[in-house]
Image (tube, helix red, strand yellow):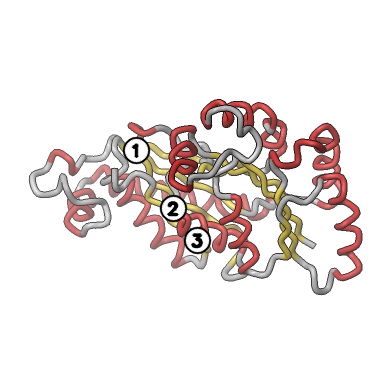
Amino acid sequence: MKIVIVSGISGSGKSTFLKALEDIGFFCIDNFPIPLIEEFIKMCEHYKERLTTIAIVVDIREREFFDRGKKIIKELKENYNAECIFLESSDDVLIRRFSETRRMHPIFESVNVKDAITKEREVIAWLKDLSNKVIDTSHLTTHELRRFVMSVYGKDKRGIKITLMSFGYAYGLPIEADMVFDVRFLPNPYFVEGLRDKTGLADEVGMYIKSDDVFKKYFLLLSDFLLYLIPLFEKEGKSYLTLCVGCTGGKHRSVFVVKELEDILISMGYNITTIHRDINR
């Protein structure tokens, strides 16, 4: 029986994450009292032929039970190999989402949203510390987050689930990265007339980058390295891997390299989710 504990900051996408899990067959519960989780799982074991995957959201709404929560979540990880996922977003994005939906913060209604978010981060910091994976949803649409869930927890294709992400160093490192590759040494299409307004998905941009001998040698080494390394991660039991490729703005070089990696890894049968975080900036 696979158990996923979903947590995170209010407004970071927990509902979208949970709904996506439900759509692929998880038995899902939102805002379930922490002290009752273990008893519920014991009950589910009697139906384990049907209840093979369970997802439970634990967040700030459980504040009455937080004193006991840390011990309980630790025991769930130790006794049931439960996987803890923590969703994160930047303050600016969270504030915008609250404004767009016209929602009050679920707990700290008496203070402004920014202060409420700060307080929430302090209260649930231990959940983030216990998590197997922290996912930054700041630059993900609901559809992209849903695709990520379907890719990681769906039952298609082989073994490890791999997320490839292009990004721009100008906008910060992705906090969810397992490995980061810097490609700022490659020729930059931004300075080429006719290519600046295109992206790394355009054939003309790809041809420009591929024509460079440095790219040819680098990409051969990179792809060989990953094809050697990924099976070792699978053997070690890693269920998903986030590989991030960065250039200055996240629009040309990193996007193209991710696109080329995607083609190779898909051809090898891996389950790939691709995110171009900063391509539209």
Left or right relative to 28: residue 155: left
In this rendered view, identify the residue nearer to me: 197 or 184.
Answer: 197
Residue shown at 84% from the left, 51% from the top: 37
Mark number for residue 147? 3
Could you tell me if the residues under marks 2 and 1 are in contact, i.e. CB atoms within 8 Å? no
Mark 1 or mark 3, earlier in chain: 3
Quadrant, the N terminus: bottom right
In this rendered view, identify the residue nearer to me: 260 or 192.
Answer: 192
Mark 2 or mark 1, earlier in chain: 2
Looking at the picture, does residue 136 appear above or below residue 264? above
Could you tell me if the residues under marks 1 and 3 are in contact, i.e. CB atoms within 8 Å? no
Crowd tier of the residue under label 1, counting other residues whose Cα lies within 10 Å: few below 14, some 14–19, many 20 or above: many
Q: Give how far across and how far down residue 172 sits, in percent.
A: 41, 32
Q: Give how far across and how far down residue 40 sits, in percent.
A: 87, 57
Secondary structure under tag 3 reads helix
How far is mark 2 from mark 3, CA to CA?
A: 10 Å
Amino acid bearing label 2: Thr
In this rendered view, identify the residue nearer to me: 173 or 100.
Answer: 100
Quadrant, the C terminus: top left
Amino acid bearing label 3: Arg
Q: Give how far across and how far down residue 141 sits, in percent.
A: 44, 53
Looking at the picture, does residue 188 appear above or below residue 4? above
Amino acid bearing label 1: Gly
Outermost residue on the left side: it is: 193
Mark number for residue 168? 1
Q: Quadrant of residue 56?
A: bottom right
Q: Give how far across and how far down residue 267 sits, in percent.
A: 44, 67
Circle nearer the viewer, 1 or 3: 3
Mark 2, residue position: 141
